[in-house]
Each structure stands twice: as C-alpha cells, then as structure tokens.
Image (cartoon, rainbow, N blue to C red):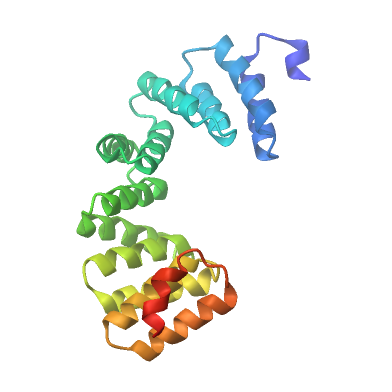
Amino acid sequence: RTVELDPSRADAMYNLSICYMNIGDNTSSLSWATKAVQKEPSNPVYLYTMGLAAEHSGMEDQALEIYKKSAALDSAYASPRINLGKILDARGDYVNALQYLQQAYQSEPDNILVWKNLGSVFLHMEQYQNSVKWYEKAVAREPNDGDNRYSLGLGYIALEDNEKAVVQLEKAIELNPQLWDAYLNLAKVYYTMGNRAKAKEIGETLLKKNPDYENRSELTPLMS
C-alpha cells in the first residue's frame, strides 16, 4: 500500500522484497528488490537483497555480480562477502572465496556464517588444521547442527584423529539421520581403526535406510 501512495519510496519496495522472500515468492522478491535498486542504486543493502533474491531464483551468475557491487559500496558490510565466499567456494575459486570471507570476519568476527564458510574453504584447500579450528567454533556455538559436525568430522579424518572423527560423525547422524555420507565416512573410519564388524554394521544400516545410496560402490569393500 505504501508503494501505491508514494512510488518514490525505495524502502517500501525493499520491505516488500523481504516479505515475498520470506514466503518463498522469489520472483516477486527479485522484482521489488530490483525496483528498490533502480530508485537507490548506491544502497548496498538493497543490492544485497536483490542478489539474494537472484540467487534464490537460480540466477547465480547474476547474484555474484550484484553481491560484488554491494560489497564495493560498503567495505564493512559482511553479508555480501559471506555469500560471495560461499558461491566462490562451491565453484572451486578458493583464493577469492577466502579473501571475501576474511574481509567479512574483520567486520563481524562473531558471525557463525563466517566461521562455517571459512571452515569449508580451508577444508577444500586441504588446510585441515585451519578448517577444524573454524568448525570447532561453529559446533561450540550451534552443537545441534549436524552439518557442522559432519564437516568437523571430515577435518578430523584428514588429520587422522579417528577417535574425534567418530564422535562427530556419530553425533551428526544422530542429529540428521539422512546425512548419508556421514554413515559412509563413519564406516571408513571404523574400518581404518580395524573394527570391521562395526564398519559392516554401519554400512548395513545405511543401505537399509537408503537402498539407492549413490556411493554404494565405496561402501561395498567396507562390508566384505
């Protein structure tokens, strides 16, 4: 209603974008965010919201460029840098992902999203000590997040700290019983530790829960 009364109100357009995003209407969210940016093209928050709506709409390339514009307008704005880091990490551009995330950390050192994404980048870069450090912080903050525990478990596996890996992987499965790769990696750890009976038991549990598990070929040798 505010937009109808005063079409110059970019803040009303922005708020409508957020409302539509919250109900899952990404097309309308992107439309209103775009209108807000057209009214105030130098507003980093409006640009970030436009990028987020674009990302949610499956327009990742466009989102990437919009996030860059948002970040360039405010050197202390962490949100676009976190999302840039996440996207670039997924694309294998770890150097630039790390740069954006380190910038985000300077602005918001207590932001758990920064910690988790730093953990992910370092895991992919095979800097396992650094990865474990960030995931340990994330797990301490949110102990009931199974994904964080799974990633921490992977870091411990890479460091050959199998006992700690078992603790994290078992807890990850407890928190998220459909985290299928956690079963596989837990079975691998037990197999490596010489407990083949336990590895087989975990493999059987996984196949009972998910008979079509896509990485079944990796599981088979652990169950022989």
Determine the image quadrant of residue 172: bottom left
* Residue 150 pos. (x, y %): 40, 65
Up-down: is 44 above or below 206?
A: above
* Residue 64 pos. (x, y %): 43, 28
Lateral position of residue 220 relative to residue 204, left or right: left
Up-down: is 44 above or below 194?
A: above
* Residue 18 pos. (x, y %): 63, 32
The residue lying at 39 percent from left, 30 percent from top is 77
Q: Nearer the viewer, residue 124 or 221?
A: 221
Quarter that holds the C terminus? bottom left
Lateral position of residue 24 relative to residue 70, left or right: right
Quarter that holds the N terminus? top right
Up-down: is 88 above or below 121?
A: above
The residue lying at 70 percent from left, 9 percent from top is 7
Lateral position of residue 67 relative to residue 19, left or right: left
The residue lying at 39 percent from left, 70 percent from top is 218
* Residue 102 pos. (x, y %): 27, 39
